[in-house]
Amino acid sequence: MKVRISKKFTIFIPKAIAEAIGLKEGSIVKLRVEGSKIILEPVLDPFEYALKSRKYAKMTFKEFEKESEEMQDEIYG
């Protein structure tokens, strides 16, 4: 898709493109330049990512708490 740059160097991201990469109002994006291209990438909210991403292990709250206490003992004595 083609978009026009406004006087203040802003662009409108078409809804279909925004939805395709999960952007919504208030989303944070990262911009970088590669050669003559501008790359726009969504910055994932860590909490949203944790809730929506695939889980690789299962752990009960008690197991998590025990692991946390052991790590704290290791670090802080």
Image (cartoon, rainbow, N blue to C red):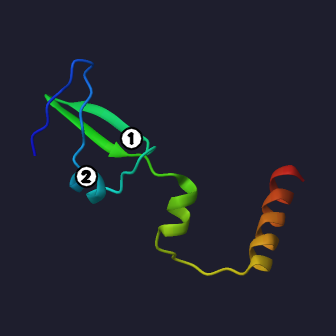
Q: Which mark is residue 42?
A: none
State how far apart marks 2 and 1 are (Cα): 15 Å
Contact flag, marks 2 and 1 (Cβ < 8 Å): no
> Residue 58 lies in what quarter of the image?
bottom right
Instruction: Determine the residue positioned at 78% across, 65% down.
Output: 68
**Which residue is at the far right?**
77
Front residue of 56/26: it is 26
Q: Which mark is residue 15?
A: 2
Residue 52 is left or right of residue 42, and the answer is right
Circle 2: residue type: Lys
> Residue 51 lies in what quarter of the image?
bottom right
Residue 59: horizontal and vertical position, in percent?
Answer: 67, 80
Residue 53: horizontal and vertical position, in percent?
Answer: 47, 68
For disc 1, the marked residue is 29
Q: Earlier in the sequence, mark 2 or mark 1?
A: 2
Residue 66: horizontal and vertical position, in percent?
Answer: 81, 73
**Which residue is at the far top?**
7
**Which residue is at the far left?**
2
Element under label 2? helix
Q: Is residue 1 above or below residue 49?
A: above
Circle 1: residue type: Val
Instruction: Determine the residue positioned at 23% across, 52% down.
Output: 17
> Residue 20 lies in what quarter of the image?
bottom left
Element under label 1? strand
Instruction: Determine the residue positioned at 24% across, 43% down.
Output: 13
